[in-house]
Image (cartoon, helix red, strand yellow):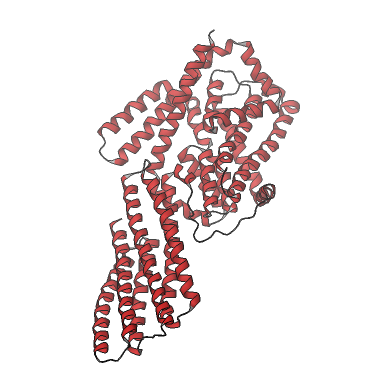
């Protein structure tokens, strides 16, 4: 028996398995992209919903490691707290069992035999890809082709290792792993850490089981180790992140280590005292899926009530506290780019946050020309600086999203967001201009006439309402609110023309100070342009 003849086909099969899994996951993600965006809203709810969300996202992207890396990114960006992260992490462990059930289906559904189904799936997928004109058809094709390649990979691995049944040395390795729980757990941890995918690691174990090589006791210890090994990816991703993001990765590790310890004690007692013979019997692919699922669901059920204690322990070990983010910090993280649809939703959330900062600026601008408050003048300048930093960060991140494999609709969404960000930033600039006008009035001890003051206040109210409707339209994706923005913008244009005409008459009649009059006219220009940019936002929303 030549080990080269085993290793090379096995490596090729593993490559096909991982590649097929990625293609299928990408297709599922693209198909569910818009739905996955709305799932982020669940994160504001309780930990139980976080478990469901983590399980669902992991089932779609076929990787608990990728889900946990995203969680680290969310925490690092400050849009998820550690309590919410804990729920998603627990759910991710459940979602990762889906791949194992797909692989083991060849045993409990004979019609799904790789030799029968894989070629059919691939050719059907290719036909759909070549003939389908819609983007959704190509996504469906990717799912089917990925499914077929995954099955070809698992079949190739199983055939490659089948000669090892006759190798006493190789069989003895698994017997040793079954008798020594620590070695079994370490083996599962090491393999999963190396290939950075518990789903692929379970697939390897199932291919060995299909060849009749793995005793049940060894498989169970290896599975437990695989759950620890999958933490490596998140731990690596937290390098260079903020301390609370590192705590999220540490929570994942603690959760799986504690679960492994609990179930290992049970397994050791069972296989050494209660039923040693059962541990020596060969395990099947379906039994591996069953054990994997029981272990992950059981760990979640047992540790869910103690999740807050795990968070406290992780924070204590990491010596961190959750700290408030600065307004100017861009709450976006490259880890979320692993799932473009969620990264896009996070960008929308960040644009909304930026929009509210500008809303606050507008509220200050409504009064600063009359109070001439130094605090408000300075606050407006600081908020404009904050908005500039957010604009740069959001724009850079949005461009990164557009460079990924996203749907045409998501490309358009990014384009609309970039334009909306630009309009919000320009409104912030005009708010800063108004603060400078207030400085001029204060330094020169000027003020508007009573008629001028009344007119500016009216104009300010209409402009602020216009932007407020635009922000609500963005938040709610409301065309009705967008139409209200357009109505307000028309009202602003008419009001600006009327106020300008009246002001010129007052100047001609020497009813107001000329220098204050210049500030008055400049203010009208700023307010009219604020309304224009609010309308631009509304029009972008109506094109989405």
Residue at the spot x=43%, y=74% of the render?
363
Q: Hey, which residue is sitting farthest right in the picture?
A: 273
Q: Hey, which residue is sitting farthest top in the picture?
A: 1
Q: Identify the image quadrant of residue 524.
A: bottom left
Taking the image as shown, residue 151 lies to the left or right of residue 202, namely left
Residue at the spot x=57%, y=39% of the render?
236
Q: Is residue 356 visible?
A: no
As rendered, which of 267 and 366 lies closer to the eye? 366
Residue at the spot x=50%, y=61% of the render?
327
Residue at the spot x=66%, y=44% of the render?
302
393 shown above or below 113: below
Q: Identify the image quadrant of residue 178.
A: top right
How far across and how far down the image is residue 444, in percent? 41, 83
2 shown above or below 410: above
How far across and how far down the image is residue 170, in percent? 62, 15
Q: Is residue 197 visible?
A: yes
How far across and how far down the image is residue 520, in percent? 33, 80
Taking the image as shown, residue 160 lies to the left or right of residue 257, namely left
Which quadrant, please, contains the N terminus?
top right
As rendered, which of 175 and 485 lies closer to the eye? 485
Q: Hey, which residue is sitting farthest front in the picture?
A: 444
As rendered, which of 36 and 400 lies closer to the eye? 400
As rendered, which of 271 and 133 lies closer to the eye? 133
Taking the image as shown, residue 75 lies to the left or right of residue 175, namely left
How far across and how far down the image is residue 231, in percent? 59, 38
499 shown above or below 267: below
């Amino acid at each position: 028996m030549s080990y080269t003849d085993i290793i090379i086909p096995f490596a090729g099969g593993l490559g096909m398995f991982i590649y097929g899994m990625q293609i299928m996951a990408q297709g599922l993600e693209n198909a569910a992209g818009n739905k996955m965006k709305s799932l982020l809203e669940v994160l504001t709810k309780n930990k139980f919903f976080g478990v469901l969300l983590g399980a669902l996202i992991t089932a779609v992207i076929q990787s608990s490691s990728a889900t946990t890396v995203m969680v680290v990114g969310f925490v690092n960006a400050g849009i998820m707290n550690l309590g919410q992260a804990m729920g998603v992490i627990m759910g991710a462990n459940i979602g990762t069992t889906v791949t194992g059930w797909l692989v083991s289906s060849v045993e409990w559904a004979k019609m799904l035999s790789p030799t029968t189904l894989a070629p059919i799936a691939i050719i059907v997928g290719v036909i759909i890809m070549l003939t389908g004109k819609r983007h959704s058809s190509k996504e469906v094709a990717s799912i089917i082709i990925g499914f077929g390649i995954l099955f070809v990979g698992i079949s190739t691995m199983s055939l490659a290792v089948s000669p090892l049944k006759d190798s006493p040395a190789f069989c003895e390795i698994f017997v040793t792993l079954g008798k020594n729980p620590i070695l079994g757990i370490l083996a599962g941890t090491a393999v999963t850490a190396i290939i950075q995918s518990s789903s692929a690691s379970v697939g390897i174990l199932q291919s060995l089981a299909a060849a009749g090589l793995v005793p049940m006791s060894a498989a169970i210890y290896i599975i437990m180790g695989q759950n620890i090994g999958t933490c490596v990816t998140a731990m690596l991703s937290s390098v260079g992140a903020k301390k609370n993001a590192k705590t999220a990765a540490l929570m994942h590790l603690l959760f799986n280590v504690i679960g492994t310890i609990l179930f290992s004690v049970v397994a050791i007692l069972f296989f050494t005292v209660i039923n040693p013979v059962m541990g020596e019997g060969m395990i099947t692919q379906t039994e591996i899926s069953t054990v994997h699922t029981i272990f992950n669901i059981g760990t979640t059920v047992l540790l869910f009530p103690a999740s807050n204690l795990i968070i406290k322990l992780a924070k204590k070990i990491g010596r961190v506290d959750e700290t408030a983010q600065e307004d100017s910090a861009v709450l976006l993280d490259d880890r979320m780019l692993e799932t473009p649809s969620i990264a896009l939703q996070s960008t929308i959330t960040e644009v909304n946050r930026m929009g509210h900062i500008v809303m606050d600026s507008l509220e200050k601008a409504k009064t600063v020309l009359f109070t001439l408050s130094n605090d408000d003048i300075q606050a407006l300048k600081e908020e404009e600086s904050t908005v500039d930093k957010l604009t740069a960060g959001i724009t850079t991140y949005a461009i990164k999203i557009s460079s990924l494999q996203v749907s045409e609709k998501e490309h358009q969404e990014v384009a609309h967001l970039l334009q909306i960000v630009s309009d919000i930033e320009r409104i912030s600039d005009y708010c800063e201009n108004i603060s400078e006008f207030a400085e001029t009035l204060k330094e020169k001890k000027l003020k508007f006439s009573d008629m001028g003051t009344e007119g500016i206040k009216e104009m300010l109210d209409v402009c602020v309402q216009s932007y407020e409707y635009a922000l609500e339209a963005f938040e709610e994706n409301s065309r009705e609110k967008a139409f209200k923005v357009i109505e307000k913008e028309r009202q602003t244009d008419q009001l600006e023309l009327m106020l300008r005409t009246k002001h010129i008459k007052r100047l001609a009649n020497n009813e107001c100070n000329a220098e204050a009059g210049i500030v008055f006219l400049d203010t009208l220009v700023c307010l009219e342009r604020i309304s224009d940019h609010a309308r631009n936002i509304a029009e972008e929303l109506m094109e989405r």
